[in-house]
Amino acid sequence: MSTTWNKTTINNLEDVLKKLLCAFALMLLLSVPAHAAETMMLATTTSTANTGLLDELIVPQFAKDTGIEIKFVAVGTGKALKMAENCDVDAVLVHAPAAEQKYVDAGVLIDRTQLMYNDFVIIGPAADPAKITGKTVAQALKAIADSKSVFASRGDNSGTNKKEISLWKEAEMAVPDAQEWYVQTGQGMISTINIAAEKNAYTMTDRGTYIKYEANHNGNAPLKILVEGEKTLFNQYSALAVNPEKCPKVKYELATKFINWMASPATQKAIGQFKLLGKVLFTPNAAK
C-alpha cells in the first residue's frame, strides 16, 4: 500500500516538474524579442516635430511599413546639418536649401530629395501697431523697424531664422540684431510664437507651425497672419542622407529606405491629408 502511494506521488511530482519546466521555458522564450527592430537616427526641424507630423504620422507609419524605428532629434536646421557633419545621424529632414547645398558640395550629404512645402508668414497682434497688414514683406519689415515695434526672432540659425535674415537683406536693411526692439529668443518656433504673444510682438513662422499654434488656442490665437503669399516666402522641405564615405558608421541603407518611403505615393498622399483645424500643414511635392 505504501509502495503504491510512493510511486503515485513520484509520478505526480514528475508531471508537476515537467509542467513547471515547460512554463519556465515558455516565459524565457517570450521574454526575448523575436527580432530587435532596426533603428535609424534622424535630425529634423522643430516645425516637423511641433506640428505632430513626425509623432503622429511619419514615425509610426514608417515602423509599420518597414519595421524600422526612427529616433529623431528636433532642432534648428543649422544644428541638424551640423549633426550630419559630425556623423551623429543617418539622415536629415530640413528646410534651408542654400545651407543644405553647402553640405552637399562638401560631400557630407547626398541624395537630396524634395518632399513637401509650406510657406512662411509674418504674424502679429490683431491691433497691428506697425500697420503691416497687406503689405509686401519688404514694406512690412521697414514698417516694423521704423515704428520700433517688437519683433521676436528665433536667433538660432534654424531654417526659419536663416530665411528671416535673408528677408531683411532683400529689403535692403541691416539685420537689426543690435536694436532693443529686436528680441532673439534662441528657442524653437512654438516657443518663439508664445514669447511674441507675451510681448505683443511680431514674428515670422512657417504656416504649419502657425496652424498648430492656432489649434492650441482652439482656433482663436492671439497672433494673426498679417503678411503672406509672396513667392519669396516659399518654404521647401527636403530629406538628405549622410554620406557613408564621410561617415562610415552611418546606416546609409536605412536612410535610403526612409527617403524613398517619404517620397512614395502613399506617404505623399498621407502628408497631404495631414491636417489641423481642417487646414493642410504641408503640401507634398516629391514628384515635381
Image (cartoon, rainbow, N blue to C red):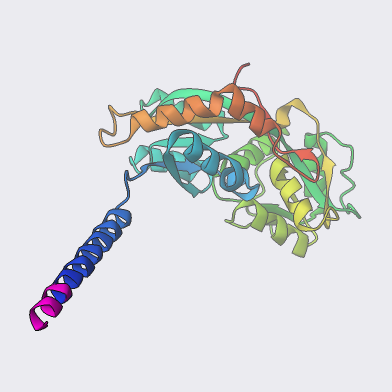
Magenta span: predominant SS is helix
Q: Residue at x 24, y 58 (%)?
A: 25
Q: Is residue 4 magenta?
A: yes
Q: Is residue 113 left or right of residue 180?
A: left
Q: Give coordinates of residue 225: x percent, y percent.
A: 83, 45
Which picture quadrant has residue 168? Answer: top right
Report whether residue 120 is seen: yes
Residue farthest toward the top in the current orientation of the protein? 288
Residue interval drawn in magenta: 1-8
Q: Quadrant of the image for the C terminus?
A: top right
Q: Give coordinates of residue 162: x percent, y percent.
A: 59, 39
Residue 157 versus residue 24 in the image, above or below: above
Which picture quadrant has residue 28? Answer: bottom left
Q: Is residue 70 magenta?
A: no
Residue farthest toward the front in the current orientation of the protein? 1
Q: Residue at x 60, y 41 (%)?
A: 57
Of residues 97 and 177, the one nearer the viewer is 97
Q: Is residue 51 left or right of residue 23?
A: right
Q: Residue at x 70, y 61 (%)?
A: 195
Q: Give coordinates of residue 253: x percent, y percent.
A: 35, 28
Residue 240 versus residue 75 in the image, above or below: above
